[in-house]
C-alpha cells in the first residue's frame, strides 16, 4: 500500500496548529487571571505578602490606582488573546470534515 506523505505532513501541521491554539488559550487565561489579581490587589480586595523580594518590599496598603489600571489593561489583553484562541479553535473544528479526516 503506498504511503501518502503529503497527507501525513498535513496531519502533523494540523496537530501542531491545534496545539498552538490551545497554548494561546492557556496563556490568555493565565494573563487575564494575573490581570484580575492585580486589579483586585490594587482595589484593596486582596492582600498578599510580596514574593521574591530583592530589596525592601512592602505590601500594598489600601487602594492603588496604578495597580488597578495595570490589572485592568492586563486582564483585557489576556481576554483578547484567549478569545482569539477560542475563535480560531472553533473555526478549525467547524472546517474539519465529519469523518475526522484532514483536508
Image: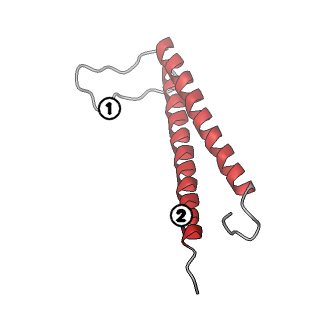
Give me the residue at 58% from left, 36% from top.
81
Residue 60 drawn above or below residue 100: above
Front residue of 14 and 89 = 14
Image point 52% across, 18% down: which residue? 68
Labelled disc at residue 51: 1
Q: What is the residue that sits farthest to the bottom in this orientation?
A: 1
Quadrant holding the C terminus:
bottom right
- Identify the residue at horizontal 66%, vertical 65% (top origin): 102
Left or right of residue 9: residue 86: right
Marks 1 and 2: in contact by CB < 8 Å?
no
Q: Residues under labels 2 and 1: Cα distance?
A: 41 Å
Residue extending furthest toward the front:
2
Quick one: label 2 or label 1, which is nearer the N terminus? 2
- What is the crowding at mark 1: few (fewer than 14 residues within 10 Å), some, or many (at least 20)? few
Q: Is residue 18 above or below residue 3?
A: above
The location of residue 8, given as percent across then percent down, is: 55, 69
Dot 2 surroundings within 10 Å: few (below 14), some, or many (20 or more)?
Answer: few
Query: Disc 2 or disc 1, which is closer to the eye?
Result: 2
Q: Position of residue 75 (x, y in %)?
A: 56, 29
Q: Which mark is residue 14?
A: none
Residue sticking out furthest to the right: 98
Mark 2 highlights which residue?
12
Query: Looking at the rendering, which quadrant does residue 84 occupy?
Result: top right
Element on which disc 1 rests: loop
Amino acid at each position: 500500500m503506498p504511503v501518502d506523505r503529503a497527507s501525513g505532513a498535513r496531519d502533523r501541521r494540523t496537530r501542531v496548529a491545534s496545539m498552538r491554539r490551545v497554548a494561546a488559550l492557556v496563556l490568555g487565561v493565565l494573563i487575564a487571571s494575573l490581570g484580575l489579581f492585580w486589579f483586585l490587589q490594587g482595589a484593596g480586595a486582596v492582600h498578599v505578602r510580596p514574593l521574591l523580594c530583592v530589596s525592601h518590599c512592602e505590601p500594598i496598603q489600601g487602594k492603588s490606582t496604578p495597580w488597578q489600571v495595570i490589572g485592568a489593561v492586563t486582564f483585557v489583553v489576556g481576554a483578547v488573546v484567549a478569545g482569539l484562541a477560542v475563535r480560531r479553535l472553533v473555526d478549525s473544528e467547524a472546517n474539519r470534515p465529519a469523518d475526522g479526516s484532514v483536508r
